[in-house]
Image: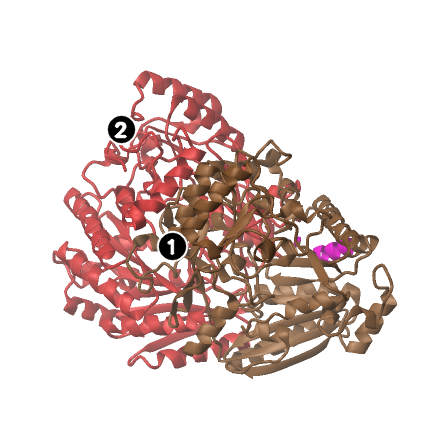
Chain colours: A brown, B red
Amino acid sequence: MSPGPVLPPGLSAARFGRALAAFEAIVGAPNVCREGAALAPYFDPFAPVADARAFAPAAALLPANVDEIRAILRVANAARVPLWTVSTGRNFAYGGAAPRLAGSVVLDLQRLNRILDVDERLAWALVEPGVSYFDLHAHLRERGLKLWVDPPAAGWGSVIGNTLERGFGYTAYGDHAATQCGMEVVLANGDVVRTGMGALDAGTYAGTAWPLYKPGYGPSFDTLFMQSNYGIVTKMGLWLMPAPAAYRIGEIQFAREDDLGAIVDTLRALQLRGTITQHAVVEGAIRRAASIAPRARWYAGEGPMPEEAIAALQRDLGIGRWNLHYALYGEPEVIDVQQRIVERAFAAVAGARMLSARYAGNEEPQGGGDRNMAGIPTMSAFRMLDWRGGEGAHVDFSPLCPADGRDAMRQYTLVKTRAAEYGFDYYGGFTAAGRHLHHVFAAIFARADATQATRAGDLLRALMSDARAAGYGVYRSHLLYMDYAAAQYNFNDGALLRLAQTVKDALDPQGVLSPGKQGVWPERWRGERGYT
Amino acid sequence: MSPGPVLPPGLSAARFGRALAAFEAIVGAPNVCREGAALAPYFDPFAPVADARAFAPAAALLPANVDEIRAILRVANAARVPLWTVSTGRNFAYGGAAPRLAGSVVLDLQRLNRILDVDERLAWALVEPGVSYFDLHAHLRERGLKLWVDPPAAGWGSVIGNTLERGFGYTAYGDHAATQCGMEVVLANGDVVRTGMGALDAGTYAGTAWPLYKPGYGPSFDTLFMQSNYGIVTKMGLWLMPAPAAYRIGEIQFAREDDLGAIVDTLRALQLRGTITQHAVVEGAIRRAASIAPRARWYAGEGPMPEEAIAALQRDLGIGRWNLHYALYGEPEVIDVQQRIVERAFAAVAGARMLSARYAGNEEPQGGGDRNMAGIPTMSAFRMLDWRGGEGAHVDFSPLCPADGRDAMRQYTLVKTRAAEYGFDYYGGFTAAGRHLHHVFAAIFARADATQATRAGDLLRALMSDARAAGYGVYRSHLLYMDYAAAQYNFNDGALLRLAQTVKDALDPQGVLSPGKQGVWPERWRGERGYT
């Protein structure tokens, strides 16, 4: 059960009631969620805190189009109602659809769900925020277009939402922010901006360079609207991967914990030289196992799984202590040569066990992870929640890691040690993207257990502090630690945050858009209530 | 001879004299250029206007470091002296080092010329604005590092300057803005910001993810400082290409003018499928010829070169009407297979003549263009100036083009026709980068001929207008048409420019940084003096 709604800070029930009535006049009563089951999806389902009201919404609105969004902004600016924008699908690891500032009104864009255009020759799509990876994939299939999406871990996610949060996937188009091209953004004052070549206003989407060339002319603004509260993105172009003639999916299992360094160094060289072009994944034994069987099969005790249990799990399932998943895409004769290069490179790691299979471009593999690498969205990521049994929840710690074996070993050891201290398994892995790795560790706990939840939250904070001391920072964070994460990026006494605040105040003087997102507070909230 | 300096608008000679004295106290007398030969390099050498004073500087300053830049900003803000920032090398096609606003003081960063760090394993460098491609290339050679730079057409260019203006090169790292990672920026108020992971302040450059992961945490600002006047970039990270085991350089000559469509469509498919990963170039016959012999060998008359002369030139030099230059990088066995794929694809274009040569990774080819594709900076681009004889000059028209054969033919026809009307040859080509092409046309004229210069300027404006009517926009422009180009990006009554102005006013309230750059004027200049 979610707790009840919370009023926007500083607003009386009467004033908020009038604002809500104005909102309702814009979007219609069925598109205003005031309480109970209607409002429940806008609470943090996995909140790693004792009091879930910390991130409780006041209400949620579901506008149908850009005009309704502009009308909502007029009301919000006049009444000073903070809005928290979400799209569709949710990443429960970082707070779901719940707002950073309790009492915000969630602006849910899931009804803006048109796929506006897809171009097969130039390989792009233009979508609205309510379009999920499932939707886009189904659309491509229905029309028989030879294009792939790059799905994130959970295919229900919004293409725009995932991209703006800098999510990533598994194919050669795995860096979602990098494959974004062109945006339409509604600013806090209601102005509708098209970025880059979209400002040419050619009347149509196709035939322009909007989704083809990112920067346009003059300064480029798109990345300003990622992980930010500077505007509401209502359209976005993205590049799609032409379906390859063939592809090969490979898994390499490594026996020892300290193989990680050699894996990362070998993989980096293969990626920087262009042999492996996709986001390859190095999964720890426990994360690999969780997609097959529950933890209790090997260990039912409290505290982190002992080494012997991990060794047993490796043997039983025939998996490695580390498991590398990679894919090669292209002409069959090219990927066959590339496969030999990959095998040659990893043969240097003693005991590496190599498996791979080649598919025609239109064939589908069966495993969830493999399907992701073949551009097919799945929900397999959610199986991790069964690991500890019960109604599982997780919060994630995701430090950026240089793609250097020494850094990877250092981060792994740091996380494993501290997690064990708090009673959690090292449930993690690394996604490799050339010069950097996304290291993602999930603290998995039983949703109903408030003590475990709080301990997971405490662990996250300890890990962020440890990482900072070692020179590492996170690329994303749960609502609870957005300020803490931002404060770590403190060169020159916080110059980057000062810049972010200056831009915020210029673009959103009333501070109505997603206050506190990624630690950026508008002027009216800074200094008071403990916000930085 | 350059004309004399011009005072900053609105400043008396006495007030400007006091500001200049204050600047001199900061940088020292030898680093202030007041007039004559010292100031000459800061005028536009190829100005396509009758009156070169239109873009005349008031003076130029050469600070030695960030502290001096901050001190200069304090004076400039107090005295309201507009500064125009340049680095080293110049692109004469767009105005060289001359300021948009006559009477600006040029801030020349060529003395900040340290290569701060280079990492061979992770393949990046961190440089200051005064570092040229020649410098960086020589540094890598001296240290024996197996890394390549991606040179632009003229190797004297600043790595930072070229990247910020969104220049491009010839290798797999040809999109310079895309290979930028991490910046240090001095804002107008003197605040020093490090973007992305650089804000972690780890004390050193190496060992952090600053040059490894672009976005950092929260909104990302780097692209805000490209083609812009929001700050002064004093350090920049860039990714370098690991020297390949081998490479192959190919040229394909096509016989007919209307082969262009098929060339572009075939090339796009090869790039989107990852066979050709570099910025391939499709050169028109005249541009190809200009690197070999002067125009007078085939045609000495006025007006554009007739078709028969172009045909004669093709025969004499053994070149195509269109000439595709491409390169393949990687393991020898991979690029051999890729070469066969390329040949198979272009065999569909009747009469295509294919030449190619394979080199070991440490071998050097001889031709200027080929050397660029092998990561070796040259100044061969300047040979184009001999085309018309005398002291040649050029101004460039550079519309973005969708990578679609129909669009390329349409732009080519449009430019060729209008250029002929103004008496200019179609001296141009296309650089192909997957989904888009950079179409670059140069109007070449005798520097001493004011009538020809003015006609070149008029042609540029006519071409921009033609392109806009057809739905195309330029990615860059000469000082003369910065406002005109910006005004073409006019969706929703100029919403993008309004956004750019809002950010400008927030970051630079006194309007001291590069007023008018890319059409963005600070509040104090908007509305008056005809600026938009």
Q: Amino acid at mark 1?
A: Ala
Count neighbours of disc 1 (C-alpha within 10 A) and say few if under 14, some if 14 to 19, many if 20 or more.
many
Image coordinates of residue B53 in percent, x first then y, are 24, 33
Disc 1 secondary structure class: loop
Q: Say left or right for A168 vs A138.
A: right
Image coordinates of residue B363 in percent, x first then y, are 51, 65
Disc 2 secondary structure class: loop
Label number found at residue B153? 1
Q: Say left or right for A278 vs B12.
A: right
Q: Which residue is mark 2?
A: B4
Disc 2: host chain? B
* Residue range corresponding to the magenta coloring: A399-415
Disc 1: host chain? B
Q: Quadrant of residue B422?
A: bottom left
Q: Residue at x 72, y 56 (%)?
A: A406
Q: Say left or right for B413 vs B22.
A: left
Q: Are marks 1 and 2 on the same chain?
A: yes
Q: Quadrant of residue B413?
A: bottom left
In the depicted structure, whether residue A142 falls above or below residue B33: below
